[in-house]
Image (cartoon, grey):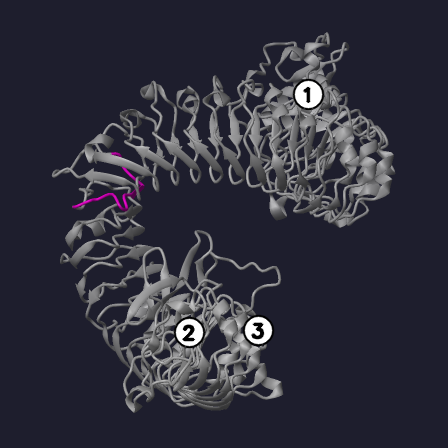
Amino acid sequence: MRTLLCFQNLLIGFYLILFRVNSILIPGHCQIDQQSILIQLKSELSFNPSVSSKLVYWNPNVTDCCTWLGVNCSNGGQVISLDLSDETISGAIDDSSALFRLKNLENLSLAENNFNFTMIPSGFGSLTGLKNLNLSNSWFSGQIPGELSQLTNLEVLDLSSLFPLGTRSLKLEKPNLGTLVRNLTQLRGLYLDGVNISAQKSDWCQALSSSLLRLEVLSMSNCQLSGPFNDSLGKLKSLSVIRLAQNNLNSSVPDFFGNFTNLTVLHLGACNLRGTFPMKILQLKNLQILDLSVNTNLHGSLTDFPVNGSLQRLVLSNTNISGVVPESIGNLKSLSWIELPNSNFSGRIPKSMENLTQLLYLDFSSNNFTGQIPSFQLCKNLTHIDLSRNSLSGTIPSAHFQDLQNLLFINLRSNAFSGSIPSSLFNLPQLQKIQLSNNNFDGALPNFSNPSASLLDTLDLSSNNLKGQIPESFFQLERLNILLLSSNNLSGTIKTTSFQGMTNLTILDLSFNSLTITTSPVLLPHLPKFFSLMLASCNLQKFPKLQNQTRLINLDLSDNKIAGEIPSWIWEAGNGSLSYLNLSRNLLTGIQEPYKVPDLSVLDLHSNRLTGAIPVPPQTATFVDYSDNLFNSSLPESIGTNLTFAYFFSVSNNLLSGEIPEAICNATYLKVLDLSNNQLTGRIPRCLIEYGGSLGVLNLGNNSLSGRIEGIFPSFCGLNTLDLHGNSLEGEIPRSLVNCNMLEVLNLGNNKMIDTYPCFLHNNTSLRVLVLRSNNFRGSVRCSEQQINTWSKIQILDIARNNFNGTIPADFFWQLDAMMTSSDGEQSSTKHLSFLVLSLNPYYYQDTVSVTIKGLELELVKILTIFTSIDLACNHFSGEIPHTIGRLTALYMLNISHNEFTGSIPPSLGNLSHLESLDLSSNKLTGDIPSVLTTLSFLSAFNLSYNQLEGRIPTGPQFQTFTETSYKGNKGLCGFPVNRSCTGSAEVLSASNSQEPNDGNDWQSLFYGMAVGSGSIAIVAILYSLCNRGTSSTNRQ
């Protein structure tokens, strides 16, 4: 890319002077033979007379051809300069052309024409007097002729192309670069941008340095050059311009570039540079342009800039250059353009930038800048400001942007700015785009002083804390194309008639405020023709009249109070262009017949009251959500064909019945398939188990599915979540599940499966949630040395209500790192389990957890990574409780009730400082209650009932909150709160009070389900439910 050509007049003045000799030479009278050659040349060339500015005026009746446009002559009347650039010349020139009879030519330009991918004629080699040859951007193709090497007087050679021509580009193979320039020792300017020089391999530096010692301009961008740089390039000490962008140099930047004292332009963008950039190059007094963009492996930091430096343009975007921008940047009084986006800069934006009065363009986006921004009031030439996606903060005084009469674009989004929006921005006459979204701006919206004269086409103030009403002046912005005000605290009532004067408005988003939009009872003929209309959570009571919206692509009316049927006309909105339709979270009850779903990409109807058959999705759909409705049909046999391109499909929480059709497996791009919480019957289709690598979530929980899990999970299994709980599945866990090495959530609870502990999954290191409760799993949980689990991430382990037996080995808890406090003592309080469904516009299938304590369901977390739980209740475990359980210092809930554990309560339980629920009831534990348990300051549910404990109940602030039922059935305990004193004779408890209840409810249970919402889809884990042999729990009072 040669974005800097406009500066050539500053860099190679001799080149332009020679091409404009008509302004400094006194031409002689044209010789007859020269005129006849030119007339013949004109007749040979094909050009467009209506566009031509030179050839069309060559008139044979004007005898002095030296006065013709584009022609300059010597004093002797010989044509020495011919400029036919940009003359719409097309076709080809062959070696017989009259052009090659102009033997005295010194300067020739055929640039900016179209020679239709023909080869450069070898006849150019006969013009041996040429000093300047310009064939740039003329659509020549193929091998550059070796005859050009005969032009030994050449000072400037330009064969460059701004446009990538691929295989039709010019190339240097035979001859190669070295052969071409070997005799061109007078060359001062070499422009070969876009020429394929790959055949030269990595010795192009030697080829240049061995012949072109006078070279001042080296421009070889996008030439397929190879690296690294060779030290021989350091011989070219006259270099003032180096452009080598878009070559795979795979090299560090040579230090010797810092010795080129004449260097004014260095452009090395997209060269796969690496290492540390030698910052002494920035100390070069004459350097005007430095572009190192798109070199992500290039490191370094900015040093102090020289006083009165000449730098005009600094482009370091998409590099790994880091650190602060020094205050000395204020020394660059000529700086007009600075681009630093997508790098690693940090610290404050220097206050000295306030004095850069020549600044036109400023882009510091996507870095780590902090603090407040400087004022730009003195930078009167600024047209572009982009400080988005940083960590900038503080208020912005209105004076910072005062009187910036040339400003066209400002982007401050995704920072932490607060206070009022600078009102000066709303009075700048040339401003076209204002983007301030995702900040903490508050207060009222500023008013436009002269909205009808405003040139503003984009106004994005979404995701702030703005409040109050939308000013009337907003609706008078006649040129406004995009208005985004969503996710604020705006209030008031807006009539749809208010938008009738905004004829250019195509994108409107007022979602998620406290606005009330009232619709017109009649069709409004003068509404803007929207592309995107987003009115989620706008208190709409009725569908707006949109029948005449022929260009509509995106329509979001979700989270409103629209009741009744979906009108049939809505499927025809956009006249076939509708792609996104979201009607979720309303009060809709049906779909008006007849209807035909158009070629939508997204169809979201979840969380309504829709009944009947589910709408057959269009074959273009990528996202379909029908969850949380009352649909009561079966899944259509053709459903898979209609989901050919879908990545998300959910019909969870409906009343669907019948079997899952095999055709569902035709939806080969699915990432999420959620059919949970319905009444589906039959077997799980084998093809779903053998599905390809794209499926990340398979949720068939809470149905009436039966039979064995048949099929083999493929070696490229991509499952993150497999939830089959709450069915009547039988048999064993398929051993091929080991192929799903990305599996995080495995929920097989509440089925009829018969198997042993899944030691075979020991290498599934991604596992975070394992639920096997309420099945017929049996045997020991002890695994062989070869199968000791490495579940370092597991945070919820529930194997309750099975037939496991034997002792718990000491190493059972050894690898559960996620249940141990990290070494730095910190854990994330916000991160939670989720599956990334769509990366471009991040959309997650999110996991949530609910807890049931004494029959009350309480949502604690969204399976936060800090939430941990172990439930081993209602099995036949025996022996002592391993003391190693004390390693799980981050454990929140522990239930090992209704087993046959013996021995004493391990004092190591006192290490579980995060523990909130502890149930050891209905075992055979003996001894006293360790006093160390009183240090568990978060403990709110505690049950030791029905054991053989004895001694005084420890006292402590937390223990004082537990009632007698926490200790019921332990004859030997005394002290508060039981009715047995530890001094004197204790009252003997009745037998009825010392026996386990037959049907008591255990507070700790665990069952899992899936719930799908529009913005998030949740794996709902309801902890602590009923156990057949449970006891009453005791909560903190």
The magenta span reads 528-541
Please name the residue that numbered disc 1 is placed on: 9
Q: Residue furthest left?
A: 521
Quarter occupied by residue 98: top right
Q: Amino acid at mark 2?
A: Leu
Which mark, residue 722?
Answer: 2
Report how far apart the C-alphas of labels 3 and 2 lie in the structure. Answer: 29 Å
Is residue 922 one of those drawn in magenta? no
Q: Are marks 3 and 2 in contact (CB under 8 Å)?
A: no
Is residue 540 one of those drawn in magenta? yes
In this orientation, which residue lies closer to the viewer: 223 or 976?
976
In this orientation, which residue lies closer to the viewer: 305 or 53?
305
Residue 11 drawn at (x, y percent): 72, 23
Please name the residue that numbered disc 3 is placed on: 887
Residue 880 drawn at (x, y percent): 52, 87
Report how far apart the C-alphas of labels 2 and 1 lie in the structure. Answer: 67 Å
Does residue 745 appear in this view? yes
Lower sequence index among marks 3 and 2 = 2
In this orientation, which residue lies closer to the viewer: 1035 or 65?
1035
Residue 374 drawn at (x, y percent): 56, 26
Image quarter of the N terminus: top right
Residue 793 drawn at (x, y percent): 54, 70
Instruction: Give the answer, above or below, for where 588 lies relative to 630.
Output: above
